[in-house]
Image: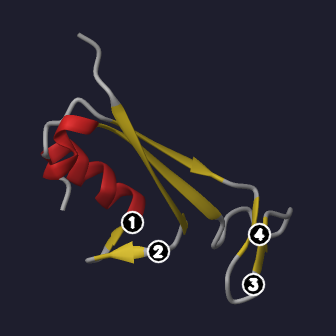
């Protein structure tokens, strides 16, 4: 039997916090706490453009500040209901 998965992709930035925790860490901890057969991958971008017109990019003086982050979750379709 093979599992069917759904992908959830969250676009944010590295300095976003949720209840005092960095968002991507909070998402990883939450998914892990559910004990799902899931995968969670966090990618940090080198540049990005936000809805408010702000452009973020790395440069030699500013190695990491407000860079884009993508959080990707692969959740078994049958267990998706457990995500709140």
Q: Earlier in the sequence, mark 4 or mark 1?
A: 1
The count of marks equals 4
Q: Any mark on residue 16, and which?
A: 2
Q: Any mark on residue 40, and which?
A: none
Name the mark nearer the viewer: 3 or 4: 3
Q: Element at badge 3? A: loop
Residue 63, percent from left and from top: 73, 62
* Residue named by callout 1: 23
* Residue named by callout 4: 62
CA gap between label 2 and label 3 equals 15 Å
Q: Say which of 30 and 6 sits in front.
A: 6
CA gap between label 2 and label 4 equals 18 Å
Could you tell me which quadrant the N terminus lies in? Answer: top left
- Are the residues tagged 2 and 4 within 8 Å (C-beta)? no
- Are the residues tagged 3 and 4 within 8 Å (C-beta)? no
Which residue is outermost to the top? 1
Q: Any mark on residue 54, and which?
A: 3
CA gap between label 3 and label 1 equals 20 Å
CA gap between label 2 and label 1 equals 6 Å
Q: Element at badge 4? A: loop
- Are the residues tagged 4 and 1 within 8 Å (C-beta)? no
Image quarter for residue 4? top left
Q: Residue at x 39, y 65 (%)?
A: 23
Depicted 50 relative to depicted 11: above or below: below
Q: Residue at x 13, y 45 (%)?
A: 34
- Are the residues tagged 2 and 1 within 8 Å (C-beta)? yes
Q: Say which of 28 and 20 sits in front.
A: 28
Q: Earlier in the sequence, mark 2 or mark 1?
A: 2
Which residue is outermost to the bottom? 52
Q: Earlier in the sequence, mark 3 or mark 1?
A: 1
């Amino acid at each position: 039997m093979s599992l069917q998965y759904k992908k959830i992709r969250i676009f944010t930035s590295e300095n976003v916090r949720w209840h005092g925790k960095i968002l991507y860490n909070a998402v990883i901890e939450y998914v892990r706490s559910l004990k799902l057969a899931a995968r969670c991958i966090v990618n940090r971008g080198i540049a990005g453009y936000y809805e408010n017109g702000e452009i973020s990019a790395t440069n030699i003086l500013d190695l990491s500040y407000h860079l884009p982050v993508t959080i990707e979750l692969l959740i078994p379709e049958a267990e998706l209901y457990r995500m709140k």
